[in-house]
Image (tube, rainbow, N blue to C red):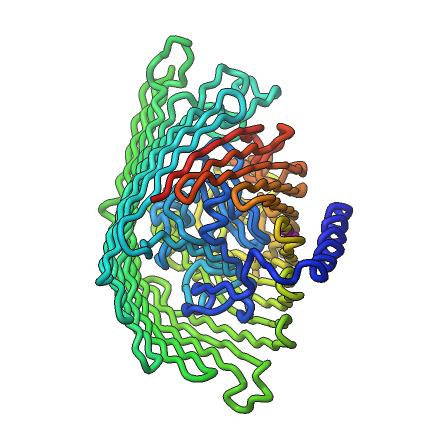
Amino acid sequence: MKQVITLLTVLFFSSSLRAQHEHDSTKTYSLDEIVVTATKSPKAIKDIARSVTLLSSVEIAGSLFQTPAELLSLQEGVYVVGSGQVPGSLQSLFLRGANNGHTSVLLDGIRLTDPSSVQNTIDLSELSLANTDRIEIVRGSHGTLFGTSAIGGVINLFSKTPSRIGVGGEAEIQAGGFGKGGSTLSEYTRAAYHGEIGLYVQGEFLNQRVRGFDATVTDPTLPASSAPRDADNFSNKQFGGKVGYISDGLDIYFSYRRTDQDKDIDKGAFSDDDNNIVQQQRDFFAFGAGHSFANGVNVRYVGGYTKLRRSSVDDSSYIPEAGMFDGTYYSNSYVGKNMHHEIQLEKKFDNVDIIVGGVFDNETMSSKSEFYSQSSFGVFVSSTDLDSLDLHTTTSAVFGYLDVNAGILSRDLQMFSLATGWRWNHHSIYGGNATVEISPSWRIGAGTLLYASFATGFNAPSLYQLGAPEIDPGSQIRRGNRLLKPERSNSFEVGVKQAIGSRLRFTLSAFSTTIDDYIDYVYLWKPNIIDSLTFIDYRGDTYINSGKQTISGVEFSLQSEISPELFLAANVSVASGKLKYDPATIDANQTGGNLLQVFENGEFLDAARSVAGLSRRPTTVNFQTVYRPTSSFSVQMNIRYVGSRKDVAYIPASGPFGALGRVDVRDYTILDLSAKYIFSRTLSASLRMENVFDRSYAEIRGYATRGRGVFGGVRFSF
């Protein structure tokens, strides 16, 4: 690993510095890239006192990826579990070592969630790059501007909006094969019209079909693991449209997107299931209006509504031709809804930018399930219905943000800037909480920015964690815990952004994040008898604020134009952390005086404990080179190294019910190659080979990855 980092660093510095002398007149990227997510107002990345990345429409179109997860996996600080598995597999995002539920994922400024899930997080496989214009990544706690879940950072996807006067659009077809018998075929089309008076309208449609392979791998030590296995297929349909008006500082729009997915899934690690089907639909509405006045005042309203429906059926109650069945039938359905309203007022002065705003959110969830079992003991039937519980929360917030350049005091102080913000949040169940941000920066010359940041964030407990209705008949303790407090984070960051001439830039940052009131799922046991616990000592299960998580790390990225034909980029990310538990700090009202066992790691909290390491947060190194010998033809190489890491595995010996433990997963390196040829202004073709050497690796223990794949596409624009 050290040799990989050293080699890449030496290569970049030596070749890039040489390029400064030879080719100073041309560049393929801009140091003045503008983003809006970091400050909720357009600002150049080079001037923002945070670690920020912009993935432009050019990078997205040239990648030949179909999912944001594949593209995000190449960025520093980002690891997406599931991006290399069978298409449609669950994709979980880990940003800067934070948990999957600690990153806020937005679409056109509207947070995407699944209120019916335990952590209220979106499965990234639901998203597509087909209609994505750009992606902005802001790392570090950002609760002041974005509220809940923005502990690891914020990822904001922006959909396309027609800008060229007249009729335009695009059509694309992609096909490919991967692994043992896997294949994919997708078609995408978008048509748009933008009138001279400012009115525009567009519509798009995506249709993807995947013939997969078994999503899990076999384990010779498990007899059931070697049974005949089926292919896990996937289909994905998306359609939608947008209508709006832009003219004289006025911007009004309304958009709709519908996603329909069918997935074949398996039971779990090493365990196949040939009749478990998940169907998921999301309706997404976004609407807004804004006006920019000549006196530097901007007013903007953003609204959104999402409804997610997910259902699954696992029917093993009949005997198929193979003669194998387990005599069970299980079905469930979930519905999650979210409504978002936000209004923002901005005033720009010379050297001062002031933003104030207000937010209102409403979330609801419901679910139904049925279970049937037939065995030698007879027939067992059970069902649940959460509709009558009226599970919902409302959240309101006010926030302010001030971005000041010291040039307001004296021209001699223009190198100093300070961004600061605050937010007050009120939750209908747990009450109020506040967040703050202070981010000073110092510009040295035209090419260097030194910055620091202290920011707080929080993660509100999910509806399921608050309201799950299951009750232990003995202790009468409910699984859902309405006494849960939000997880609270303090994040420190220092960094430097450096540009050398117009052809080389790099960033280096170090960060540390502490998360208090960490939410854990726990078993409750009769106290003081850990060594002789039996099932009769069980007192139920629930969610509690258990302890403290600490995360620290370093990130480095570099981009260089060696010549007008050759572009290189690389990044390195390292993070480590631990969990600390102290029973004396845990609210006794949440535990009922019982002994706690943390399901995530099996620890019994009879005394202070410390658990080192973070599951599924590896060290990563990414290297990219693009060679463009002509204006029409380009080739690209990506090398991705993922370090060894810990994964979770069920350990039956951890107490009477067992719990999760940690197992090692080995490191891997993957080489991808791609090429693009532009025939004309309207027609282009692309070819990509992933995992060129067919490297065998695992993202999650017990689940298969795609292996070598070859994908091609043809794109027509008009």
Vertical position of residue 108 compared to residue 229: above or below: below
Vertical position of residue 648 compared to residue 580: above or below: above
* Quadrant housing residue 395: bottom left
Is residue 570 rendered magenta in the image?
yes
- Give the x, y percent position of residue 364: 28, 52
Horizontally, residue 592 falls left or right of residue 293, namely right
Q: Which residue is nearer to you in this view: 96 or 717?
A: 717
Image quadrant containing the C terminus:
top left
Q: Main secondary structure of the magenta part?
A: strand
* Quadrant housing residue 109: bottom left
- Give the x, y percent position of residue 475: 40, 47
Horizontally, residue 617 falls left or right of residue 676, namely right
Q: Which residue is nearer to you in this view: 605 or 300?
A: 300
Image quadrant containing the N terminus:
top right
Vertical position of residue 512 compared to residue 88: above or below: below
Residue drawn at the location 49% of the way across and 77% of the way down: 420
- Give the x, y percent position of residue 478: 37, 49
Q: Is residue 263 visible?
A: no
Residue drawn at the location 28% of the way across and 61% of the way down: 303
Q: Is residue 497 visible?
A: yes
Range of the magenta residues?
Answer: 569-573
